[in-house]
Amino acid sequence: MQSRMQGQRTLQLRQNSCIQPKWISQKNFTFGAATSAYQVEGAAHRALNGWDYFTHRYPERVSDRSIGDLACNSYDLYKDDVKLLKRMNVQAYRFSIAWSRVLPSIEPFVTIFHWDVPQDFRRRIWRLLKPTYSDFKNYAELLFQRFGDRVKFWITLNQPYSLAVKGYGDGQYPPGRCTDCEFGGDSGTEPYIVGHHELLAHMEAVSLYRKRYQKFQGGKIGTTLIGRWFIPLNETNDLDKAAAKREFDFSVGWFLDPLVYATYRPPPMPTQHSVLTDSGVTIGFERNGVSIGVKASINFGFELLMLIANALADNGRIQFQCSHLSCLKCAIEDGCNVAGYFAWSLMDNYEFGNGYTLRFDMNWVNFTNPADRREKASGKWFSRFIAK
């Protein structure tokens, strides 16, 4: 009964007021903002990646038929990005390094892979349907060698579920494969093959970092998952409860269970899955919806949990962030070990599948002249919230 009451308290959105950060020990909690390389960098003079090919060849797959060749031009305007971060009072910046391309007093949280597979690589290994983890391991090691003395937080993969399902289940992301898609595919099998290879790639990178670099570089490494949570339509109905659990298993447990328990849903692939257990200490959740809470922390025993991407594309953005931070306070009080909160995104950017049609970020960008950037009301609010 007590656990249920805690859960209800954690799930309650406080619409009338917002908590202040005094409940957080700044020494142990990180506020940050986030972006990804393809969505903000521009400067397309690098090796092609899958999104370059996909958006140029099949523009109809993007809402406004746009491409990310310029985006926010952060490749050239990175100093302006730093100014935005400093103005917002954030302590950390989560960004990705483009696989196809190989800031002071702000802690870098580096995503190793945020869906931008090199196009030539994608062709060579038949679009992630063959094992790619050794190549990913080599790429990760290059980053550890070059940047490990300055980067103390590594994120191996961003939302492996999204790449597997949207790239190989419904064809919305490169390479656009699915059952009955013009590029071919099998929605019933390919997402699971790709997801399995993503898990193995994560494992290889984590194992490498722990064995060769972690001791003297002193960093942490983990992954990020979609943090969906499902509630039974009728909490007294066993079928409804089973349906909620089943949906969680398919969207979150698919990747979380192998990392924590070395068990698979769906059934196991090859025997390599046994080495996935404890292959990452930092679990980041990217979520929009019902609040996380004590149940998730207890069931999976996270050493460290961060809420690393939170966004809403409407005028209620400030209240949205405020409500979620209130629930985050409840989750921490209920025993969930949450160590950080990263708002998505630092600035308007090129949204995968939607181009420039969505602006749910904290700083406005003029996409015809990306040097023209202006702080939105939500950015000012977030800055004041952190600074108090």
Image (cartoon, grey):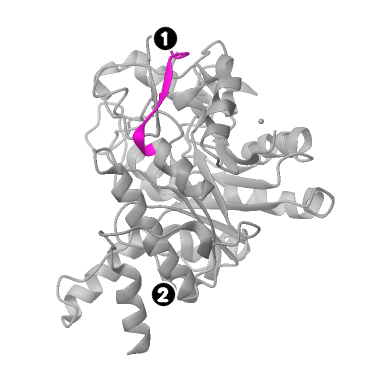
Examine the rendered structure and indicate whether residue 212 appears above or below residue 380. below
Q: Measuring from the top left, give residue 51's x and y in whole percent.
A: 42, 24
The foreground one among 43 and 381 is 381
Find the magenta span and give its range. 370-378
Q: Measuring from the top left, give residue 288's x and y in whole percent.
A: 32, 51
Q: Measuring from the top left, give residue 166's x and y in whole percent.
A: 33, 39
Amino acid type, mark 1: Asn
* Residue 266 appears in the picture as rendered: no
Residue tagged 2: 295
Q: CA distance from mark 2 to mark 1?
A: 46 Å
Amino acid type, mark 2: Lys
* Residue 310 appears in the picture as rendered: yes
Examine the rendered structure and indicate whether residue 49 appears above or below residue 313. above
Residue tagged 1: 369
The quadrant in which residue 165 appears is top left
User: Tag 2, which secondary structure?
Assistant: helix
Residues at badges 2 and 1 in contact (C-beta under 8 Å)? no
